Amino acid sequence: SGIETKVEEATSRGRIDMVVQMPKYVFLFELKVDQTADIALDQLHAQNYKKRYLHGGKQIVAVGINFSTQSRDINDWKAGLYTSEGAEIRSLSQ
């Protein structure tokens, strides 16, 4: 199917919760519980997790997701789409 998934992908600055590689895109997921999608996305940026995937010829999608223990569901998410060089194309949110 051309999809490769890794969880707890180690970097020199921490661990990316989940990485999904597809032919044209790399998705980087940071997951939180009872926090916010902003906190998750801030961690992706602060730890510079996308650095490893720059210049690979694929666009990068950084996704922050928060799960609520009260609703037992995703209650917040945000994402950013970046070029393969790291320039932001656009941001997305719920």
Image: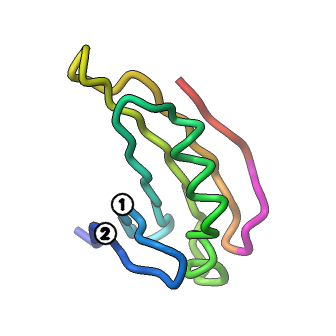
Residue 76 within the segment the image draws in magenta = no
- Residue 86 in picture, x, y percent from top left: 73, 68
| Range drawn in magenta | 85-89
Q: Would residue 40 appear left or right of 59 to someone viewing this image? A: left
Task: Report the front residue among 43 and 24.
Answer: 43
Query: Which of the labelled discs sits on residue 32, or is there none?
Result: none
Q: How many neighbours does mark 2 have within 10 angstroms: few (below 14), some (14-19), or many (20 or more)?
A: few
Residue lying at the far top in this picture: please name it: 71
Query: Which of the labelled discs sits on residue 8, or is there none?
Result: 2
> Closer to the N terminus: mark 1 or mark 2?
2
The residue that appears at 43% across and 39% down in the rendered structure is: 65
The colour scheme applied to this rendered structure is rainbow
Alpha-carbon distance for marks 1 and 2? 5 Å
Contact? badges 1 and 2 (CB < 8 Å): yes
Residue type (three-letter) at the residue carrying disc 1: Asp
Image vertical order of residue 43 relative to residue 64, above or below: below
Residue type (three-letter) at the residue carrying disc 2: Glu
- Residue 1 in picture, x, y percent from top left: 22, 68
The residue tagged 1 is 17
